Every structure is written in C-alpha cells, then in structure tokens.
Amino acid sequence: MTARLRPTHAEVDLDAIRANVHTLAAAAGDAAVCAVVKADGYGHGAVPVARAALDAGASWLAVALVEEGEELRDAGIDAPILVLTEPPPAGVDRLLAARLTPAVYTARFGRALDAAGRGRGEPVAVHVKADTGMGRVGVPPDGWEGFLAEAAGWSGVRIEALWSHMARADEPDAPTTAEQQDRFDAFLALAGEHGIEPALTHTANSAATLVQPRARRDLVRVGIAMYGLSPSTEVTADGHGLVPALRFVTEVGFAKRVTAGTPASYGHTWSAPADGWLASLPVGYADGVPRLLSNRGEVLLRGLRRPIVGNVCMDQLLVWCGDDEPHVGDEVVLLGGQDGARVTADEWAAWAGTITYEIATGITRRVPRLAR
C-alpha cells in the first residue's frame, strides 16, 4: 500500500464497538442483537465494525443497500444480513446470490421474490415491514389486510419476521412510541388471522433498545449507539455507558504569528483579536468537517480547546492559538480525546445544528479509517 502523505485520518476503536455491543445486549435482555452497519458502518468502516459486532455477540447485521451486503459477503462475513430497504425488482438475483434477507413492504417486490423462490425451488426468507406511524416505508395500515392476504399465499416466500420502525423512540416521553407498539400488535394479530406466524418480530432501534422496553421484542437493531454516539440529546451515549469508537485527528500543517486585526480565510468573517498564533490544519469540509463549524467549533491541541476561526475551507481550516506557539506536526484532535480533554460528536451536532448520525456518516471516504 502507498504510504499516506497527509496526516488526517480517523482511528476506529474496535474494542469500543465490542464493549458497546455488550452494553446494548444487556439492555436488550432476551432479545437478539442486529448490528446496523449501513453507510459504511456509520462512517466507521462496515467490514471491521461488522466483524467486531459479531465477535461481541451480535447475531444479525443490517444494511440499507444490496451493494452494502455484497461488500460484507465479499469480505467473507457469513452472518445473516437484513437489507432494510427494498431494491428494485431487477436486484432480486443479486440479493439472492449474496444470501441477503430482504425487507418487503410492497406487493410488487414480494411477487418478484415469490417468483424467484418458486423458480429456485426454495422459499425466500423475508422480513415484512409495517408502517405503524413512521410514515416512511412499510405496508400502510389501510393496506395491511390486502397485503397479508396475498402474502399468505406466496409459496416462494417464507415470512421469517414482521417488523416496524419507531419515529420518536429517542424522545422518552413521546406518546407515539406506545401508540406505534399498539398498532404493531394489531398488525401481528391480523397476520395471525392469515396464518402468518413469524419466528421473529422487531421494532427497536438504538434509542428504543435503551429506553423503550416494550419495543425490544425478539430482536433489536442497534445503529448509532453501537458506535458510542447519542441517539438524541435526551438519550445520550454517556448516560448509558457507551464509548465513542471514532477519533478524528490531523496535525498542524503550517503556523504563523499575526498582528491584531489580521483577517483570515474566505470572506474575512474573522480577524485576529490580538497579536498571536494561527495554525493551519490540512482538513476541511471535503473531509467531513461541516462548514457550519466556522467561527463556532473547537479542536484539541496539546490538550487545550482551540477555536476554529474563519470559514472552514474545502481542504483546510484555521485554529487560533493566542500566545501559545503551535508547531508543525503537533497532533490536533477534531473528534475524540487528547490528554484528558474531549471534543464530542454531540458538540459538533449542536454547533452545526444537526444530529450525530450526520456527523459520523459525513466523514468522507478520503479520510482513511485505521481500525485497531
């Protein structure tokens, strides 16, 4: 492999992933754990994260795309893999060739799988998804009866699981989670009337696994929490003993002393408040540092918080160091810990007006992930 020339990289602590899976499994009680590794393992690297999660006791994996499932199979991972979103019917052959388990919520896709299963002489195991209030994808309530009546007659399909997704599980006091659970129970009862008795039911995401006992059922799907990141400001990682697995670091690439009033970066949105030192870092929004952190975010340099000043550029950003002279090669931590201090994804999300999910998945592929 060609040596890296730029010091910017992300370190992924697989022991933290394993510890988080153990913590989540304990919260889940008797429910099995499905590790969600879509979007390249929420930006942490799907293959190493999947292996670590399985090592720690997860029995399922979940992805959003057939292509993501194929990547895991190409890496030699043999565990059951649920594809959370229907691909086009033209993708059925690839899905089955990779031994992936499809989510089903339209009759059109179910019929394509039924035909494929009959053609192979072996039913295709599927997980049928009901929309119980998320309002995104899933068999809508007014279509439950017709869908289940038809699905019960598919000889090329075996309904292994029935499932749904919670819209507000990360708001512990929101009444909608209980309402969705009631609707899901109604869906299960209706399925039973049609002779559908699944081996598994599942409705819990990370937040529901942690704070919504009724949602846990037979299987929990843990995503953001497995990476040690908070599902919301009300359901925090720290509050549940979860450990951040990613550390995003770079080095000082250039340093200079400037006089008071010196403007810096595009638009001159910042000027030096006094004589002092500016450090340039070889990292920017093309790497996943939100431009919204301009004049708002902070980094760690020698264990001290230093403000990001001026507009974040595509490949660089500036840090104000005051009277402390930075040196080229000094380690700078964008996310994670250094010398007892820490900058968190929760903070980035607050500064950027977004959620931790977007922070993690926004770190781009040009930032090498170094799993350890």
Image (cartoon, rainbow, N blue to C red):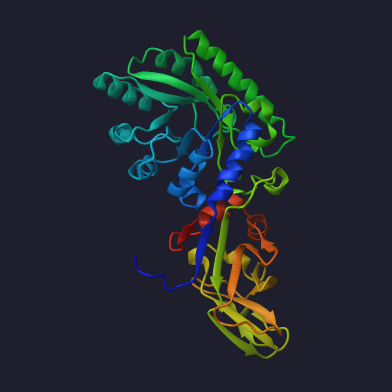
Q: Residue furthest left?
A: 119
Q: Quadrant of residue 185?
A: top right
Position of residue 84 measured from the top left corner of the image (x, y, whole percent): 46, 35
Position of residue 346 measured from the top left corner of the image (x, y, whole percent): 66, 54
Q: Quadrant of residue 118?
A: top left
Q: Is residue 248 above or below residue 15?
A: below
- At x 28%, y 33%, the residue is 93
Q: Quadrant of residue 333?
A: bottom right
- At x 32%, y 36%, the residue is 98
Q: Nearer the viewer, residue 140 or 260?
A: 260
Q: Nearer the viewer, residue 288 or 13?
A: 13
Q: Residue furthest bottom?
A: 259
Task: Count numbered badges in the picture.
Answer: 0
Position of residue 239 measured from the top left corner of the image (x, y, whole percent): 73, 45
Compared across the picture, whether 269 is left or right of 287 comes to right
Q: Residue furthest right?
A: 173
**Res 5 seen here:** yes
Where does the N terminus fall, quadrant-wise?
Answer: bottom left
Q: Is residue 229 above or below residue 265?
A: above
Position of residue 335 measured from the top left corner of the image (x, y, whole percent): 61, 62
**Res 107 seen here:** no
Q: Is residue 122 above or below residue 91?
A: above
Compared across the picture, whether 103 is left or right of 94 comes to right
- At x 65%, y 58%, the residue is 344
Q: Nearer the viewer, residue 19 or 368?
A: 19
